[in-house]
Image (cartoon, helix red, strand yellow):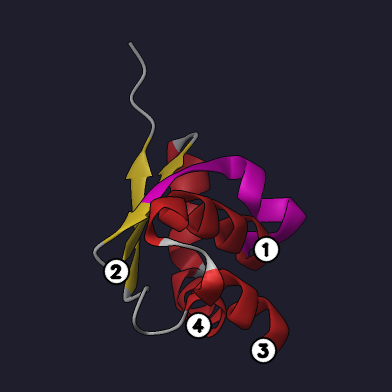
Amino acid sequence: MEALRHILSQLPQAAEAGAGAMAWALSAGPALAPEARCEGLAQGVLRVRASSPAAARRLAAVRPELERELLAMLGAARFQRLEIRLEMTS
């Protein structure tokens, strides 16, 4: 985990969204990551958009664990919280 955190910390600010997307995929894992699209990391907030109300509930149920993993990967200077939004359909 420390090696991954070091790699992510070396990415330039312009690559912040990429670092957030990578950290999201790794922390959520193959079961949860496909249920939400990473919208980006800005000002310490990683925003993901859940594909359905059920997916949003599943993600909310494990938010503390996800936030711990994201904090370990990204560090406190880049990550403070996870924001889960619901995909809006027309």
Is 1 situated left or right of 75 in this image?
A: right
Give the quarter of the image for residue 24: bottom right
Q: Nearer the viewer, mark 4 or mark 2?
A: 2
Residue 26 has which mark? Answer: 1
- Work out whether 59 lies above or below 78: above
Q: In this figure, which residue is indicated by the disc labeled 2?
A: 44
Q: Nearer the viewer, residue 84 or 24?
A: 24
Report the residue at 45% width, 78% height from top: 64
Q: Nearer the viewer, mark 3 or mark 1?
A: 3
> Of callouts 3 and 4, which one flags the residue occurring earlier in the amino acid sequence?
3
Q: Which residues are magenta?
A: 28-40
In the current view of this chain or complex, which residue is farthest to the bottom? Answer: 2
Report the residue at 67% width, 89% height from top: 2
Q: Give the main secondary structure of the magenta stretch.
A: helix
Q: What is the distance, in whole Å, between disc 1 and disc 4 at their CAs?
A: 12 Å
Q: In this figure, which residue is indicated by the disc labeled 3?
A: 2
Residue 63 can be seen, yes or no = yes
Give the quarter of the image for residue 80: bottom left
- Work out whether 64 lies above or below 58: below
Q: Position of residue 16 (x, y in %)?
A: 42, 57
Within-10-Å neighbours for mark 3: few <14, some 14–19, many 20+ = few
